[in-house]
Image (cartoon, helix red, strand yellow):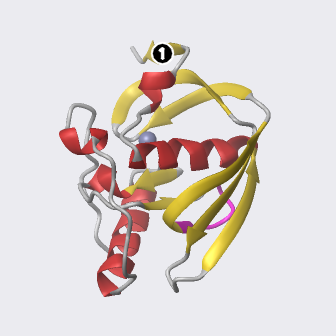
Amino acid sequence: MAVFQVVRLGEDILRDKAIEVKRINSNIHKLLDNMADTMYAAKGVGLAAPQIGVPKRVVVLDAGDGLIELINPVIIEKSGKAVDREGCLSVPNVTGDVERAQKVVVQALNREGELMEYKAEDLLARIFQHEIDHLDGILFVDIAQKVYRDE
Ligand code: ZN
């Protein structure tokens, strides 16, 4: 079990475009394990590799139905629109109303290197979009219609 400190807003790595994974090896497996441990320890529903200081296109998420691991994820379809409140482990004590696609289809490699396709809607679709944004240096506060700060 390896729990990492989550990188906070203000660190450059959150703004960089993460690099595609070329080869899925034991380092990537270890990264996925560390990311899941860190996400669960922080009680988050998703985590992108840059959030633990690793500039690679790797995401983990769990909306309550089990762990999903994504390597080089790409959104191939988007439909509908929905606005809902979001938060982020890298932006503590802040939430915001963000408009996202209501449904998405995402392609990504799994840890075995197989190309997987995920169809998601509502909360799960929102998490996919939020986490994939992290890989392009985009944070929810950049695109939120309204931001709320906890007292
Ligand atoms: Zn986030």
Q: How many marks?
A: 1
Which of the 4 image quarters holds residue 13?
A: top left
Question: Which residue is painted at 46% across and 60% down in the image?
Answer: 59
Majority secondary structure in the magenta region: loop
Q: Nearer the viewer, residue 120 or 87?
A: 120
On screen, residue 115 above or below 85: below
Mark 1, residues whose alpha carbon is within 10 Å: few (<14), some, or many (≥20)? some
Question: Which residue is painted at 28% across and 70% down in the image?
Answer: 2
Q: In the image, residue 143 lies at what x, y percent?
A: 49, 23
Magenta segment boundaries in residue numbering: 63-69
Q: In the image, residue 116 lies at what x, y percent?
A: 65, 73
Query: What residue is shown with label 1?
Result: 147
Q: Judge from the rendering whether residue 54 lies leftward or rightward of residue 128; answer left or right.
A: left
Check residue 65 for magenta coloring. yes
Q: Nearer the viewer, residue 20 or 40?
A: 20
On screen, residue 125 above or below 114: above
For the question of whether residue 95 can be seen, the reply is no
Q: In the image, residue 117 lies at what x, y percent?
A: 70, 67
